[in-house]
């Protein structure tokens, strides 16, 4: 069984695709099936999220696999004006709901309770099967890979301790 554990920036060729919904792209240990039918084991550091288009390789770097975000049940949230969309984003964040931010819309996982709340706030909520790529959050790190000199690196975690600054805190 092929074991994947490193992200790489580019590859001459891609051997297969690994199509996964967001829920599985968050897992640090995963057994999955490639588009070729081959089973693979994916080992990442806790806190790593695989994103659509990421390239993964194993120990010898000969086999490269591309991660593909699978279509899954989501809601596309749009509003008549930016203020209402911002209110929706606030209330979703207040409920610690993962959200993808698009140009004039939000996308969340399908959830009937959240749908009712959003409709009550004046939003349009459309069911759709779409790739879900939520924001990583303020402490989740970026998608870029600066400082890579050899073109690959082990998958890295989100910091375990995150200091949140509040306006009343002393400097």
Image: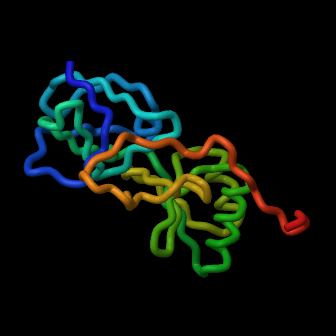
Quadrant position of residue 167: bottom right
Q: Is residue 146 above or below residue 12?
A: below
Quarter of the image containing the N terminus? Answer: top left
Outermost residue on the left side: it is: 13
Q: Is residue 48 above or below residue 142?
A: above
Residue 135 as seen in the image, left or right of residue 38: right
| Percent of width and height locating residue 73 | 44, 45
Residue 119 as seen in the image, left or right of residue 128: right
Point 70% across, 69% down: residue = 87
Count of labels shown?
Answer: 0
Quadrant position of residue 43: top left
| Percent of width and height locating residue 142 | 47, 59
| Percent of width and height locating residue 136 | 53, 54
Quarter of the image containing the C terminus? Answer: bottom right
Point 53% across, 46% down: residue = 110
Q: Nearer the viewer, residue 144 or 129?
A: 144
Residue 93 as seen in the image, left or right of residue 156: right
Q: Nearer the viewer, residue 58 or 150?
A: 150
| Percent of width and height locating residue 32 | 30, 26
Residue 6 as seen in the image, left or right of residue 112: left
Point 50% across, 69% down: residue = 105
Point 58% across, 73% down: residue = 79
Outermost residue on the top side: it is: 1
Q: Is residue 41 above or below residue 98?
A: above
* Colouring convention used in this rendered image of the protein: rainbow
Quadrant position of residue 154: top left
């Amino acid at each position: 069984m092929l074991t994947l554990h490193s992200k790489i920036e580019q590859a001459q060729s891609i051997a297969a695709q690994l199509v996964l919904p967001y829920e599985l792209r968050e897992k640090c240990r995963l057994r999955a099936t490639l588009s070729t039918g081959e089973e693979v084991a994916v080992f990442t550091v806790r806190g790593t999220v695989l994103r659509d288009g990421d390239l993964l390789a194993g120990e010898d770097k000969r086999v490269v696999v591309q991660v593909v975000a699978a279509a899954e049940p989501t809601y596309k949230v749009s509003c008549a004006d930016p203020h209402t969309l911002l209110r929706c984003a606030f209330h979703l964040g207040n409920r610690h709901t993962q959200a993808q931010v698009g140009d004039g819309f939000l996308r969340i996982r399908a959830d009937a309770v959240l749908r009712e709340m959003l409709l009550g706030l004046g939003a349009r909520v459309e069911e759709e099967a779409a790739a879900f790529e939520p924001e990583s959050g303020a402490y989740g790190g970026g998608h870029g890979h600066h400082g890579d000199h050899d073109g690959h690196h082990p998958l890295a975690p989100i910091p375990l301790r995150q200091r949140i600054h509040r306006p009343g805190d002393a400097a």
